[in-house]
Image (tube, rainbow, N blue to C red):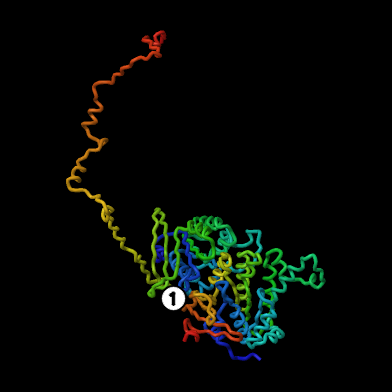
Amino acid sequence: MLLDLIRGNELSSVVLVKDSVDCIDASNVHVLYNFLLNQIQRFEKVILLCYEDSPESYTHALPENIEARIVSLDGTKHPHTWLDFHDFDKTGVDGNIKKLLEDNLPQGNGNIGIVIDSLSFHLLLRPPSFTCQFLRKLSTSQIKGYDIKQIVCGIHGDIFDENSLRLVEHTASSVLILSPSQITSHTSICSSIHHRTSGKVLRMNEYFNVDENNIVKDLREVKSTAGTTEPEEKSIDPASNLTFNLTLKESEKEARSQLVLPYTYDKNKQDAALNQPGGGKIFYEADDVDDLDEEDPDDDLHI
Amino acid sequence: MNSIKRSQLEDILLQDCQLRDNNLVLISESDWHVDGTFVIHSLLSLYQKENYNICFLAISQSVGHYLSVSKKIATDLKPSIDSNKLIMVDGLKLLGLSVVKDCVDINIQSIQDIETNFEDVFRKNSLQKLLDLLNSNVDKLYSQSNGSPTVLMIDNISFLLTLGISYKDIVIFCHSLSRHLKETSRGTLVMLSSVYGEDDKSEALTNYFKHISSTCLEINSLSSGYCKDVHGELKITRKRKLERQKKIEKTLQFKISDKSIKLWALGLSSAVL
């Protein structure tokens, strides 16, 4: 699943990669790098937008002929303008991303992909719903004639509260959660949740390694060890180990099975009850106090 | 004057942390029971021995404290201050003055006149002026150096949280500092941060720094409790990055005595062997 997403075999418009402090061998940086490499082969241009570290940290590791197809945008340049800010529009960590992209892209057509190294500053400086909106809008927009086909973002799972993280994860069509693995053959685990456009949701846990060229490989699915269900508990017979006798003899068991309960459905009985010929007759003897009048009280009504 | 003899901890810091190749070194105290300041003192004396330009922001202790501790571990900081290779910003004293300035009873003219960059920190919860001060100190150091690298040390960054500054401002502050250092002098930012018990914000702050740091030195207390022979564990982590193929993850135990720090591999304390 991880490799399918990276290579584009599984289409996903917004991919979120989440790591934690424990991810020492393979963190967001490595997975995003793999996405970057593959996106360059699939799309006309790739935009690399970096906030935590300068784009050179990614482009340094890329082969030379590829660098020309990447538009690097350095979001780390003016962090001091984010301090004490009250005017959102000046900062560059906001919806003006679209304007930033428009300023840096030449006119053209084709598909482009965007890789954002970290949404940390977006989530820090803006309410989480703003980040969700911005991602959603960006994933379906057109810039200078290019179609944005895929956005890949990195996020750290242990510095924001659950609520914000969940909101952003919900906006993404795929979420890749990285964690260190406990086994020796592989260094890391990727838990992926992918929502296909058909509506099907795929979940998978895979082991992976990152080699010296920072390529993700050696994927292997994590097999859960708890496969067998517990055998059903033997039912305990409550009538054993008693000082008095609660068991039945064979004859008694047979008599019990032949007993017909009073309200059991039996066709004959039901027919007899329904088709009773005679109605009931009421015999009433008047007391001294009764004032019985044989006439029909409604007789004088002319309806 | 600067002896080339290094202590055991200084050797470890130099080699395992690869001191010259760092943009951000984080020293984190993981709970109440440990004190990570010994690493700061060792790093300070190591940087001095390696002839770095140092700007030191002291918030949790006064400047006098650092001077006297480093005299004890056999390096004297005064000559470095005199030759402008070391700038000590006495955060504790200046913060205190900002608080006192407002008091009705105190009307000493000398205090009223002191313009501190810490006033905004206290009154407006703003770090802008402090950021400008530190950046200008770094520029000053760099301009008068002759190729020696610069380092900015902060003790203790989590203290700013307790002053009421928002977590987001501290993150941006550190981000700006490390960016400025990287651009001007390829320098290093060294910070000591603590996790205060159950406080989410201090934990989130420390986690953020762990994510962006090149080297993390984590001081943990022993999980089994207090021991007079082993004071805690020091865990050195250098994450694998794109340009760095090998990660380093090393755990050592230590014991702090009056004048020195002894370190050894896990379980091999001299008390046990």
Q: Position of residue A276 (x, y in %)?
A: 24, 24
Looking at the image, residue A275 lies above or below residue B207: above
Quadrant occupied by the N terminus of chain B: bottom right
Q: How many marks?
A: 1
Most foreground residue, B135 or A159? A159
Relative horizontal placement of residue B214, taking residue B131 as reference (left or right)? left
Figure quadrant of residue A72: bottom right
Most foreground residue, B94 or A292? A292
What residue do we see at 60% from left, 62% from top?
A92
Q: Which residue is mark 1?
A: A213
What residue do we see at 47% from left, 81% from top?
B266
What residue do we see at 63% from left, 69% from top?
B173
Most foreground residue, B106 or A210? B106
The residue type indicated by label 1 comes to: Asn
- Is residue B198 visible in the rendered structure shown here? yes
Figure quadrant of residue B258: bottom right
- Is residue B216 visible in the rendered structure shown here? no
Most foreground residue, A62 or B149? B149
Q: Chain of mark 1?
A: A
Q: Position of residue A239 (x, y in %)?
A: 26, 52
Q: Position of residue A154 (x, y in %)?
A: 50, 65
Q: Position of residue A164 (x, y in %)?
A: 53, 59
Figure quadrant of residue B166: bottom right
Relative horizontal placement of residue A205, taking residue A113 as reference (left or right)? left
